[in-house]
Amino acid sequence: MSGTSVDLTASSAPAVLARRARVRLRAVLPNREVLATMGRSPRKDLLAGLTVAIVALPLALGFGVASGAGAEAGLATAVVAGALAAFFGGSNLQVSGPTGAMTVVLVPIVHRYGTPGVLTVGLLAGVLLVAAALGGAGRFMAYVPAPVVEGFTLGIAGVIGLQQVPAALGVKPSGAQNVVIGAWDAAAAFAAEPHPAALALATGVAAVMLIGARLRPGVPFSLLAVVAATVVAGMAGLDVATIGHLPAGLPAPSLGFLHVGEIPHLASAALAVAALAALESLMSATAADAMSVSERHDSNRELFGQGVANLLAPLFGGVAATGAIARTAVNVRSGAASRLAALVHAAVLAVVVFAAAPLVSGIPLAALAGVLIATAVRMVEVASLRALARSGRGEAAILVLTAGATLAFDLVTAVIVGLLVAGALALRQVARSAALTRVPLHEDLAPADHHAEEQALLAEHIVAYRIDGPIFFAGAHRFLLELAETTDVKAVILRLSRVSAIDATGALVLGDAITKLERRGILVLVSGVQEDHLKTLDALGVLDTLHAEHRVFAATPDAIACARRHLHRHLAGKTRR
């Protein structure tokens, strides 16, 4: 009988796991309710999708070129990833595609492994994102502090702008890994052999975009400026580099790009791409919620959509994609009501890929550099930066360090640095909130004991300290060492009812303070220890002696009564002597 029971239990385990997997998968797949939203306002979605496509076209081309994979890779990403992320994602208003932040991560991968390496990394990142979605990792976005996000965005803006310096100056990139050094090398090359035409095109496009956005925010000045720059360059015969030949249409799906032997070496890069895709996409979805009235995204479903997009986009020659904050904002402000708008945006770009490739191939690289420089400038929210700087030195330090690390190292390192500094400052703040306060005994005495003689006697020989806040490694030494220096008393009562948390280090420091007091002949009593804190203290043996001598009390009056008995016995012994 028992053997049969074990067999049944063992055989049911795979079924239970399969059932759980189906439940999690069903939770992230689009359901009827989600898909039904696409029929709410099709006219609004069509107009919004067309508007976003007009804005997205030069950005897709520019980010494709900037990544090193080529303009065609940027377009393929915008079409394939844009459609898949819209259909499977967790936001009704999110628009996905190639972004500047992702470009920053992809450039060193292109330099080291070439385009096949970038495509392999994108596919691996897609697998990681799907796994994160099924594991419910979307909820962790809420734990990223605002100064880290702002510093991260500021650093990305700086990197994007510096990356465009060679194209804007009309010189070849030096190949330097650090963008600051690369921009410096480009400036030196330009000084030796100036290319005023490229600089004029880049400056003109950026100026039109920035000024136009202030005067008429609804007009797609990026596309107008790029078209104008292309026409001027062609009519004037300017000697500037262009995008070059673009294939008409998307390549057939292929796994030929896979670098199977390099996968172990590309794992860290794939992790960085997946982390960035998750962070930027969820940030963008959150921004879309804030700009709309009633929309709320599903974080895990959004990660799943981005994972599917990154899994399949590389098969068509695309690079890693994320939710795009700028395009999502245009989508919302253009009146989008559902994910149909993002699907329309992808469809319009697909028409461009299949029908207008020859026209796109003549766009000057300097014009695209101007688009990305203007995009980088618009990414910087000066009001938000000022508000964080005024909120405190700690927040300002986190912001500056995160932005600096983004410029000096890479995006994942920058976020880790920002989180570590934010965590350290938070621990410092929590540690400072802990306090050791000497409290009067009469608060806990019975009314009959409130006569002056008794109170004076107790105050002279017995003291009570209340500990408020956490007792943990970051701050325990600061106030518990003060406790250990208590002198000229016969008994110390420690009131621990207001301790909010205690860890092993804090418990050991507390035990050390108790030991030092007792070595000087001071009786120590403890009251009000919470049940979960008592487990920690008992596990480390901090209160073993006090338990053995019945000096751990649930209520402070009981501890006072015990201390009084000890005091009177002590005084009686002195009198007899």
Image: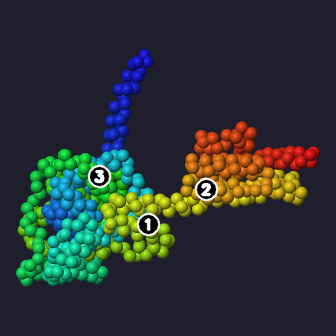
Mark drawn on residue 477: 2
Who comes first in sequence, dot 2 or dot 1?
1
Q: Mark 2 falls on what kind of element?
A: helix
Mark 1 Cα within 10 Å, few/some/many (few <14, many 20+)? Answer: many
Q: Are marks 1 and 3 in contact (CB under 8 Å)?
A: no
The kind of residue on which mark 1 rests is Ile
Residue with the mark numbered 1: 398
Q: CA distance from mark 3 to mark 2?
A: 39 Å
Mark drawn on residue 268: 3
Which residue is depicted at the point 21% across and 75% down? Answer: 186
The answer to whether 475 is drawn above or below residue 525 in the figure is below
Image quadrant in which you'd find residue 343 = bottom left
Q: Nearer the viewer, mark 2 or mark 1?
A: 2
The kind of residue on which mark 3 rests is Ser
In the picture, which quadrant includes the N terminus?
A: top left
The kind of residue on which mark 2 rests is His
The answer to whether 69 is drawn above or below residue 134 in the figure is below
